[in-house]
Structure formats: structure tokens, C-alpha cells
Image (cartoon, rainbow, N blue to C red):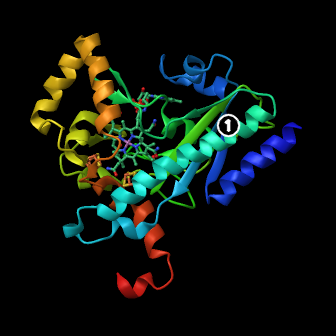
Amino acid sequence: MKADIINAVKSVAEQEGMLMGVASADALNAKAPHGFRPMDLMPGARSVIVFAKPLPLAVFLAPDGFNNMFYQRSAYTYYLLMDKVADKASMMIQEGGYLALPVPAYSPLRFHEGEPKGAISLKHAAAEAGLGKLGRNSLLINQEHGIAMRLGALMTEMEWSEYAPAVGFEPCPEKCHVCEQACPIGAINDGKVNKIACLGKCIKHILLPPSFMLPAVKKAVARSRMLTRFMELVSLNFFETYGINCTACLKACPHFLDKSKSLKNRDRTT
Ligand code: B12
Ligand code: SF4
Ligand code: SF4
């Protein structure tokens, strides 16, 4: 019976062109910060199933004048798709007799210490589920599919047949700091990203305060429960879509460039 559920979930991911990996909830419970552990969302969680889907590389390569419109659309569509697959797989698991909780791929966000946060860190969950490792730009990198991926997940009380073994590959050569150098605002420092600075640069939204005001907004929100709740509502009601203004740390990475050069005929066009 369990084997049937596992196969059904795998085939849903496959049909949508997604990679899938499974992490033990206990492993994430032990490493993730309080409030962002699987057990904080679902006390009986045993397994975290993570989905990853590569994006079409051309959406990143359109000329500047297009303002990332192609990537924006793919990113938005992918968020919905990740949520749809997580919901569908959760229902299959539930029909097999176990609770399963789909985790939002993006929205709704919670505000924690003045910063927007997801329910859990999908990058860390994906790494634990054997889908890759985090690079110095803090993004998940898969050995075969590269860096241009969106992630989704669900957690369940069902024990999986086996959990992912540790991934052997090291994504970042020791001397590579290309992503740090490529970031136009210097927001990346050896695996740590200044998230508020990045947010101010890479998110374009008519309601977003200018980037120089964001640190002050963060401080004010961090101090007030009422403002925190207000910001959660603002992000839920108004930030479901937004413009994207920067992808430099992703596009400059050799894992992006190598993937795009490996395509047939790319040597003619680059
Ligand atoms: C909010 C958010 C942002 C905000 C960040 C604000 C913030 N304060 O985090 C901003 C706007 C800056 C942002 C930017 C981008 N984002 Co974003 N973002 C998210 C989102 C929705 C939530 C992140 C989050 O809050 N995680 C939860 C908290 C707890 O994690 P954290 O603060 O990162 O955690 C720290 C610690 O708490 C600890 N930790 C937390 N959990 C765990 C678990 C373990 C096991 C361990 C060891 C440690 C640990 O480590 C972290 C480092 O200190 C995620 C989706 C998601 N739910 O993961 C996407 C996501 C991370 N973003 C994504 C992407 C693609 C981007 C951009 C490339 C978008 C773009 N410009 O094109 C940039 C990348 C910038 C960069 N180099 O990091 C993808 C990443 C895909 C990938 N291949 O890795 C995600 C996963 C969305 C998705 N569904 O695919 N993002
Ligand atoms: S998305 Fe842009 S601003 Fe944000 S860390 Fe990457 S390069 Fe820097
Ligand atoms: S640019 Fe280099 S250091 Fe940065 S994530 Fe890619 S491989 Fe790692």
C-alpha cells in the first residue's frame, strides 16, 4: 500500500517534469531554526518531499529592455505549479491514510524579525532531500540541472521507504566568487545574502518603499506585532506577483552558463 502511494507521488512529479527528493523530517528538525522546522508546522511530520523544476533558460537571456518579463511570468507560473503538485500529492497521501501538508512555494509569507519568510527554507529542505547543494550565492544547485530551478514541497506523517543519501558534489570551486562580484549591490558574502538589500534591488513593486528605507522598515516591523501582522496582510494581498529586477548572481554562475552552453547549437549563438 505504501509502495503504491510512493509510486503515485513519484509519477505526479515525473509527469510535470519535476525532480523529487525526500528528506527525513527529523534531520531537518535537528538543523533548522526554531519556528521553521517541519515539527513547528506539523508535529507528527516524518518526511519532507521536495520538488524541483528547471526553468527555460531563455527566459533569463532576453535583452535588458524586456525587464525580465519572460522570467517573471515563468517564475509566477512555476510557483502555482509547485503548489498544485504539492496539493495533488498531499491528497494522494491522505487517501492512503496519512496526513500531508502542502508547503507554499512562495506566498503567503510570514514576517519574522522584520523580514519576509517562508514556512520553511525550501533550499535547505531540497539539499537534505538530495536534490543538490547550496552554492555561495545561497541558491540550490543541482549537478545535472544547474541553478535555474524553482522548488516546492509537502510534509507528511508517512514514513518514506528511504531517505536521500548525502550529495557528494561540491558546487563551488574554492576560488570562484563570480556571484559575489556579479551582485550589483554587493549583497553576497561567502554564502550569506543581505536579504533586505537583495529584496530592495531585485523586487519591483509599486508599493515597495525605496531600498534606502527598507532597513528602517525592517527595524520598525521587528519591534511591533501589529506591524508584523499588517505586513503579512500587505504581502498576501498585494505581493502575489511582482516585477523582477535582478538575476545577476544566478546568471553569472558557471552552473547557469555551463548548462546554457551545453545545449545544441549554443556554440553558434554565444
Ligand atoms: C523570501 C524569499 C526571498 C527574499 C529573501 C527575504 C528573506 N528574508 O529571506 C528575497 C526577495 C531577497 C529573495 C531573493 C531571491 N530568491 Co527567494 N525566496 C524567498 C522565500 C519565499 C522564503 C525564504 C525563507 O524565508 N526561508 C525560510 C527561512 C527560515 O530561511 P532563511 O532565512 O533563508 O534561513 C536562514 C537560517 O534560518 C538558516 N536555516 C533555515 N532553515 C534551515 C534549515 C537547515 C537544514 C539549515 C542547515 C539551516 C536553515 O539558514 C539560513 C541562512 O542563515 C523562498 C521560498 C522558501 N519558502 O524557501 C524563496 C526562494 C529561496 N527564492 C528563490 C529564488 C530563485 C530567489 C532569487 C534568485 C529571485 C531572483 N532574483 O531571481 C533571489 C536570490 C537571491 C539570493 N542570492 O539568495 C528560490 C530558490 C531556488 C533555488 N534554486 O535555490 C526559492 C526557494 C523559491 C522557490 N520556491 O523556488 N527571496
Ligand atoms: S538577486 Fe541580484 S541583488 Fe539579489 S543577491 Fe542576487 S545579484 Fe544580488
Ligand atoms: S558563481 Fe561560483 S561561487 Fe557563486 S554559486 Fe556559482 S559556482 Fe558557487
Q: Residue at x 25, y 40 (%)?
A: 199
Q: Residue at x 24, y 17 (%)?
A: 227
Above or below, comparing residue 43 to residue 235 in the picture: above
As drawn, the residue found furthest toward the right would be 1
167 horizontally vs 211: left or right: right
Q: Measured from the top left, where is residue 71 in percent x and y?
A: 36, 60
Quarter in which the C terminus is drawn: bottom left
Q: Is mark 1 within 8 Å of ligand 1?
A: no
Q: Measured from the top left, where is residue 231 in percent x and y?
A: 27, 25
Q: Measured from the top left, where is residue 213 in percent x and y?
A: 11, 31
The answer to which quarter of the image holds residue 256 is bottom left
Q: Quadrant of ligand 1?
A: top left
Of the pair 79 and 261, the residue shown nearer to us: 79
Q: Residue at x 54, y 55 (%)?
A: 53
Q: Secondary structure at mark 1?
A: helix
Quarter in which the N terminus is drawn: top right
34 horizontally vs 99: left or right: left
* Residue 173 at least partly seen: no
133 horizontally vs 199: left or right: right
Which residue is label 1 attached to? 90
Q: Residue at x 26, y 51 (%)?
A: 243
| Amino acid type assigned to the residue bearing label 1 in the image | Ser
As drawn, the residue found furthest toward the bottom would be 268
* Residue 240 at least partly seen: yes
Above or below, comparing residue 255 to residue 5 in the picture: below
Of the pair 252 and 95, the residue shown nearer to us: 95
Q: Measured from the top left, where is residue 133 in percent x and y?
A: 52, 45
Looking at the image, how many numbered discs can be counted on the residues? 1
The answer to which quarter of the image holds residue 224 is top left
Q: Residues within 10 Å of mark 1 (few under 14, many from 20)?
A: many
